[in-house]
Amino acid sequence: MTTRRTILVIDDDPAVRDSLAFLLDVNGFAVTTYETATAFLDHFARNAADCIVSDIRMPGMSGLDLVRKLKADAVACPVILMTGHGDVALAVEAMKAGAVDFIEKPFEDEALLRAIGEALKTQSSAPADGTVRREAEARLVDLSPRERDVLRGLVAGKINKVIAHDLGISPRTVEVYRANLMAKTSVRSMSELMRIAIAAGL
């Protein structure tokens, strides 16, 4: 019998904790839930989990603070953050701090399961930093200068309207560039695009 991978869920909403615990359990994961990041840290043993799924906005310590704390303590467990719609700037900051992914609420069950699967896969086959950067740069090589400008704006956490103002173009044109970015880099989500851009040093 294969060992079940352990996922830790941190969210101050009991309904979210219960639904995620059920979803992960029926998909073959062992699950432990916590109401706050502080409660999690009080019980966390260094090798007790394969992946952490945490809300980004919580009372007390935020998901972003948690990511920074785990990195400072050299804990290698991948963290996926759940964000509210429009919290992309915060999520990008968290990815720069070391989170492996973020997903916007409300999300499909499949989106979370895919993010966890990717995080576990990345964890077990983490290549050298130089390799990650070269691979990321290779995926951005076909971008036009203007597409790179838009991508830099996104990495800075700016919304379409602000990027449009900065570049002297319309918000609709920014949307077209964003669609081009997704297509040219063959990504399925904004978080994947952000991960590549950050790895490439944009």
Image (cartoon, rainbow, N blue to C red):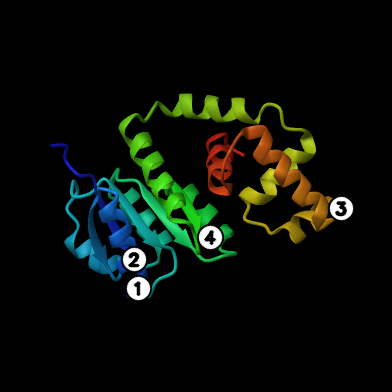
Do the residues bearing badges 2 and 1 touch, measured as CB atoms within 8 Å? yes
Circles 4, 2 touching at the beta carbon (< 8 Å):
no
Q: Is residue 116 left or right of residue 186?
A: left
Question: In this rendering, is residue 109 above or below 127?
Answer: below
Mark 3 or 1: the one toward you: 1
- Three-letter amino acid code of the residue under disc 4: Leu
Q: Earlier in the sequence, mark 2 or mark 3?
A: 2
The residue indicated by pointer 3 is 168
Q: Which residue is mark 4?
A: 90
What residue type is disc 1 on?
Answer: Ala
Q: Position of residue 198 (x, y in %)?
A: 55, 41
- Element at badge 3? loop
Residue at 45% across, 60% down:
82
Q: Nearer the viewer, residue 179 or 42?
A: 179
- Measure the alpha-carbon separation of dots 4 and 1: 23 Å
Q: Quadrant of residue 200?
A: top right
Q: What label sits on residue 19 in the rendered view?
A: 2
